[in-house]
């Protein structure tokens, strides 16, 4: 960018932002994370976005919203992106539509290697004593479970169960119904339970029993 004329650079940014229906500020924020966006021709960038959105059966607006969180999606080849999505969905026994719905919430899923993603899911399920299908059902509701490290996830589950005086199996059963529990810090979760129990005049054990 050092050698680009300021007027040319600014004109490209404004044109790209306009084509993507973003504010100039929002586009610049994405480009700061992925500087090659500053160099791409606005029409080429917009065309890639439109093709990617179409291949994923998303509106352009929905794709741009996801790419704004993970700017490398703006310049990834549409065919490559779609291929990764289809391969990931197939390995996970999900429909393409279901995988895309999860990835829109956690856009890094769009570009993770399918084999790595599937390996994490299988390892997490095994560590938690679940079938791959049961863990996937939770991950679809709480998409960050797709990419959380299996060992970290399992460690958090064991710590949460211990703090709540539950067996690991019992905690997992509850978390399958409320998958966000898999992602909460054990100390935060335990603190919330203790505070709620105290406010309601219940013992921690009694609150856990009805939660």
Image: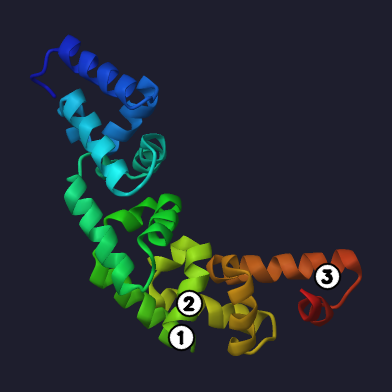
Q: Which residue is mark 1?
A: 131
CA separation in Å, label 2 and label 3: 29 Å
Q: Residue at x 88, y 74 (%)?
A: 202
Determine the residue positioned at 70% across, 67% down: 191
Number of residues whose C-alpha sits closer than 10 Å to that of mark 3, classed few (under 14), some (14–19) or many (20 or more): some
Q: Which residue is mark 3?
A: 197
Residue 24 shown left or right of residue 208 in the figure: left
Q: Is residue 152 left or right of residue 79?
A: right
| Nearer-N-terminus badge (2/3) | 2
The quadrant of the image that shows the N terminus is top left
Q: Nearer the viewer, mark 3 or mark 1?
A: 1
Quadrant location of the C terminus? bottom right
The first of marks 3 and 1 along the sequence is 1
Q: What residue did someone put label 2 on?
A: 135
Is there a contact, CB below 8 Å, between mark 2 and mark 1? yes
Residue 26, given in percent of the width and then of the height, sits at 38, 28
Name the secondary structure under disc 1: loop
Q: Is residue 20 above or below residue 179?
A: above
- Residue 209, percent across and down? 79, 81
Q: Residue furthest right?
A: 201
* Secondary element type, mark 2: helix
């Amino acid at each position: 960018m050092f050698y680009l004329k300021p007027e040319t650079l600014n004109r490209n940014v404004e044109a790209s932002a306009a084509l993507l229906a973003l504010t100039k500020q929002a586009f610049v924020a994405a480009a700061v994370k992925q500087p090659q966006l500053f160099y791409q021709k606005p029409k080429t960038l917009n065309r890639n976005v439109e093709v990617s959105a179409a291949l994923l059966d998303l509106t352009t607006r929905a794709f741009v919203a996801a790419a704004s969180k993970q700017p490398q999606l703006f310049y990834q080849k549409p065919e490559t992106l779609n291929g990764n999505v289809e391969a990931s969905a197939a390995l996970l026994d999900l429909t393409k539509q279901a995988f895309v719905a999860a990835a829109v919430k956690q856009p890094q899923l769009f570009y993770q290697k399918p084999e790595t993603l599937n390996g994490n899911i299988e390892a997490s399920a095994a560590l938690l004593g679940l079938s791959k299908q049961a863990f996937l059902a939770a991950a679809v509701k709480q998409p960050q479970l797709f990419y959380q490290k299996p060992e970290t996830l399992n460690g958090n589950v064991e710590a949460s169960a211990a703090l709540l005086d539950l067996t690991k199996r019992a905690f997992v059963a509850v978390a399958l119904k409320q998958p966000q529990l898999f992602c909460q810090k054990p100390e935060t979760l335990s603190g919330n339970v203790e505070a709620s129990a105290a406010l309601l005049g219940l013992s921690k054990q009694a609150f856990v029993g009805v939660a």
